[in-house]
Structure formats: C-alpha cells, structure tokens
Image (spheres, helix red, strand yellow):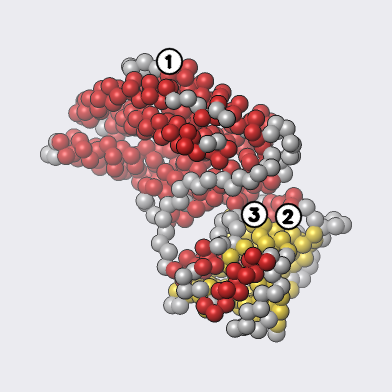
C-alpha cells in the first residue's frame, strides 16, 4: 500500500495558461499525458458507501488498476491509501491489495462491478526538486467528467508529495497561489463523478463529528475537529455562491463559529501566533456573512406571522420591500467574500499551519477535555445568575457562552458516557433555542428601524416586544432545568 499525499486546487479555465509561466515552473518543460479513467462500482454503490474508488486508467499504452480511499480533503489536503498495479479492463485482480479484509470485500463485489462514470483529461506535469530529499509533482489537469449524458469540466492543479515533508508541499502550493487564482478543492474527481452519476442534488452540509481515535494527542483531536469544520464550510461554498437559499449561508456561519470555538477551546495549547493570525481572519469572514443571515431570518421567520396578523397594513409592505433590498445587497457582498482571493488564501494558509502544529503527549485529552468543559460550564452558570429579564446584552452574553459550551460538548462527546451526555446536550439545546429566538427578536427590532425609520416601524416593534415578553416567561424555567443537570464529564 502507498499513501498518497496531495493538495488539490481548482482554478478558472481562463487562468490555466498562466500556470506554466509561474516562476516555480517556468524553467522546466512539462510532460504531457492523456489520461482516461473508468470508475467501477456495484449497482447499490457498495464501494461509494465505503468511500472507496476503483478505476482503470489508460496511461499511454498501459492500463493500471487502482484502488483508492476517497478521504475528505479539508483545505485541499488529501491523504489517501492507494493500491495500483497493471491490469486489463474488465479483469479485476485485487491481489496487490495488501489489506486482507479490504481485498475480500473487493473480491466479493467483482461479479457486480460495472462502469459508473469516466474522467478524460490532459495532464501537464512538472517535477520540482526545491532541495535535496524533496520531490513534488505539480500537475495541471484539464478535461471532463462524463456520466451518461451529463458532463462536468475539470480544471485543477494537483501537487503530489513524492518525497519530503508535507510542509514542503504547502510551501509550493502557497507560492503558486500567490500569483494564480487557486482555490483549495474539497471534492476529488471520484466524488464529483459519483455526484454526477447519481444525480445528487446540491444540499446544505451540516456539522459532522470529528474522527477521534484512541491514543490521539490533544493537538491531534484539535486538528481533526477543525478539519471537520472546514469540510462543513467548503461543503456549503457552491450553494452559497450559486443560489439564494438561506441555509447555505447559515451552515457556513455555523462552520466558522465552530471552528473559532475550537481555536478558543484549545488556545492554551496553541502557539500564540497561530491564534492571533487566524482567529481575527475567521471572525472577519464570519461577520461578512452575518448581515445576510440576519436579513434572511427577518424576512423568512419574523415578518410572515406579522403579515398574517395584519395582511393589509401598508407599512408592512414597505418594510418587506426595503428588507428584500437590504438582503440582496448583503447577499451579493457575502458571495463576493466567499469568492475573494483572501478566502482561498485563508483556507490554504490555515490548513498548512494546522498540519504543522507541534504534537505533545501532555496534557492528555482525557484531562484536557473535562478541565475545558468545567471552565465553560462555570462561565455559563455565572452569566445565568447575572441575566436580567430586561437586559438583552446579558442574555446575548449567556447565549454566546452556552453556545461555546455546546460546541465543546459536541467536540468531546465520544469521550464521555453517551446517555448522560445526550441528556445534558438536549437541555442545553432547548435553552439555546429560546435564547436564539430572543436574540433574533432583538436584532429584528434593529433591522426594522434600519429599513423603515421613525414611527412606520412601530407596529413591528410592538409585536416583537410582545413576543419577547412571552419568551421571557419561559427563560427562568429552562435555565433552572439546565443548571439542575449534573455535568456528565464529572462522573466516571
């Protein structure tokens, strides 16, 4: 088995000709290859469910049978297991797969293997040797993915580490990105091919658990956690850029909040320059999406029940029109932020710095996790005492602290008894939901005045004040219920 380590970067077709002129590549001639690949699976997509790719590749006059794990690519970085050997299309000899369990799985699928999609592209590649002991292949791939009557274009740069350190690979990628519009890709050609073949609709991507394994250091758990956040963020990029569906911006913001929460949670173990560099940049990007989310909530959740109660009120129609104008402008700005070179640079630089974080066996995650959770729980308890019915700022501070505690609970959940953790999380989620709706109401009052100044917003503000009074009646009950639950991490 070989371990393939590469960075995948997409670029506009209009910029492809500029790749060979980059200073890293300008002094060497590329090698040109025509690569045609056919990917196989069973009718029930057994391999896809296992995140495996099986393909035959025609490379010049040679056919290669490849088995590859289709792992996630946070920030463009992909590290995959790969087995490759000569073969002939239609013949599946998996004897070169040295994992017995995997080989038996593949051999059992042979009678049902059939072509699913293909990739057809021209590769120009250069070999970089920036220093002794380092070899990096830089490839420019241009072509198409074909699945039945459907096609997608391929235009991407791949950097594969043949010899050396992963940091060398990032150095080359960052040097290329400094002069080319390269964006870290999160989907492999195989993943894109399956989407095309299956007709998978574009849907918002929600948070998923990080991959935790026994023996991981605290920094390794941090790395897995933030890479899970990046996967969620990048999974919503296309929907955010290409549609007006509110959920894509919402999930992108959730991903960034979770990522920033992880940075703050692990801050005692992280280099100060790492935190001071990246936390403000993620905050700036999240803020650029924030106004769009606020107007989305205002239009889709706040205004409809008021319209239903007062369907003919002229001020409400004016307010809706102004709100939609504000939303359109904010959405345009958010989409621009997610397509800006600064976002692409942030993704690549953050991934490089996260991979490079030094490891340490101390403190063990079994000690770090409960200590961190205790700090956040005490902060929530203190703010709960300070919260007053008429103080939106205190409620907001409590909501932020509780949200950070909930994210920490999610990050560390596999370390603690599932049943106790679930009850505690459910209680926190109920309280957060109420505080979130109260915060939405406070923000809505501000937006109503912004969209419709003066007394024209009186009706909306009066309705919102009544809604706040109703929710305040529930606040003490939910707070008491949450605080009565014993923290699950304090029990063996």
The local secondary structure at tag 3 comes to strand
- Counting from the top left corner in percent of width and height, residue 478 is at 35, 25
Residue 455: numbered disc = none
Label 3: few (<14), some or many (≥20) within 10 Å?
many
- Give the mark, 2 or 3, whose residue is nearer the N terminus: 3
| Residue matched to label 3 | 77
Q: Is residue 93 left or right of residue 187?
A: right
- Mark 1–mark 3 Cα distance, whole angstroms, equals 45 Å
Q: Which residue is mark 1?
A: 385
How many neighbours does mark 2 have within 10 angstroms: few (below 14), some (14-19), or many (20 or more)? many
Q: CA distance from mark 2 to mark 3?
A: 10 Å
Q: Is residue 487 left or right of residue 178?
A: left
The nearer-to-camera label among 2 and 1 is 1
The answer to which image quadrant residue 51 occupies is: bottom right
| Element type at mark 1 | helix
Residue 84 in picture, x, y percent from top left: 70, 72
For mark 2, what is the residue?
A: 169
Residue at 74%, 50% (x, y): give it.
167
Q: Upstream in the sequence, badge 2 or badge 1?
A: 2
Q: Number of marks in the image?
A: 3
Evaluate if marks 1 and 3 touch, with contact meaning CB atoms under 8 Å apart: no
For this rendering, which residue is in front, 334 or 262? 262
Could you tell me how far apart the alpha carbons at marks 2 and 1 are, in whole angstroms?
Answer: 51 Å
* Residue 119 higher or lower than 162, as above or below: below
């Amino acid at each position: 088995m070989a371990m393939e380590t590469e960075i995948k970067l997409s670029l506009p077709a209009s910029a492809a000709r500029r790749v060979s002129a980059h200073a890293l590549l300008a002094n060497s001639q590329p090698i040109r290859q025509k690569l045609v690949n056919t990917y196989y699976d069973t009718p029930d997509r057994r391999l896809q469910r296992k995140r495996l790719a099986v393909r035959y590749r025609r490379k010049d006059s040679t056919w290669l049978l490849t088995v590859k794990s289709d792992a996630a690519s946070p920030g463009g970085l992909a590290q995959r297991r790969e087995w490759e050997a000569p073969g002939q299309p239609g013949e599946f000899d998996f004897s070169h797969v040295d994992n017995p369990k995997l080989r038996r799985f593949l051999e059992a699928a042979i009678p049902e293997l059939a072509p699913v999609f293909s990739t057809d592209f021209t590769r120009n590649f250069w070999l970089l040797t920036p220093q002794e002991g380092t070899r990096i292949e830089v490839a420019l791939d241009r072509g198409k993915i074909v699945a039945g009557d459907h096609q997608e274009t391929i235009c991407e740069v791949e950097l594969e580490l043949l010899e050396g350190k992963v940091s060398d690979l990032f150095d080359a990628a960052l040097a290329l990105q400094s002069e080319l519009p390269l964006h870290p890709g999160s989907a492999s050609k195989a993943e894109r091919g399956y989407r095309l073949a299956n007709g998978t609709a574009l849907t918002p991507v929600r948070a998923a658990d990080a991959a935790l394994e026994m023996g991981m250091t605290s920094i390794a758990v941090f790395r897995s956690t933030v890479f899970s956040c990046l996967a969620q963020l990048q999974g919503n990029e296309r929907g955010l850029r290409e549609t007006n569906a509110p959920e894509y911006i919402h999930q992108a913001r959730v991903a960034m909040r979770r990522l920033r929460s992880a940075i703050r949670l692990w801050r005692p173990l992280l280099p100060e320059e790492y935190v001071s560099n990246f936390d403000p940049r993620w905050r700036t990007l999240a803020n650029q999406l924030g106004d769009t989310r606020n107007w989305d909530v205002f239009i889709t959740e706040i205004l409809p029940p008021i319209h239903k109660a007062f369907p003919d009120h002229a001020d409400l129609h004016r307010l809706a029109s102004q709100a939609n104008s504000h939303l359109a402008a904010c959405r345009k700005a958010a989409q621009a932020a997610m397509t800006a070179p600064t976002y692409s640079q942030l993704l690549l630089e953050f991934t490089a710095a996260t991979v490079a974080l030094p490891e340490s066996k101390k403190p063990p995650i079994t000690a770090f996790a409960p200590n961190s959770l205790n700090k956040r729980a005490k902060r929530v308890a203190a703010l709960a005492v300070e919260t007053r019915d008429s103080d939106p700022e205190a409620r907001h501070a409590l909501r932020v602290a509780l949200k950070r505690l909930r994210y920490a609970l999610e990050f560390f959940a596999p370390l603690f008894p599932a049943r106790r953790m679930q009850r505690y999380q459910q209680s926190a989620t109920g309280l957060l939901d109420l505080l979130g709706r109260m915060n939405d109401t406070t923000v809505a009052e501000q937006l109503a005045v912004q969209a419709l100044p003066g007394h024209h917003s009186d009706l909306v503000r009066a309705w919102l004040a009544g809604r706040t009074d109703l929710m305040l009646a529930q606040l003490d009950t939910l707070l008491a219920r949450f605080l009565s639950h014993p923290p699950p991490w304090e029990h063996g």
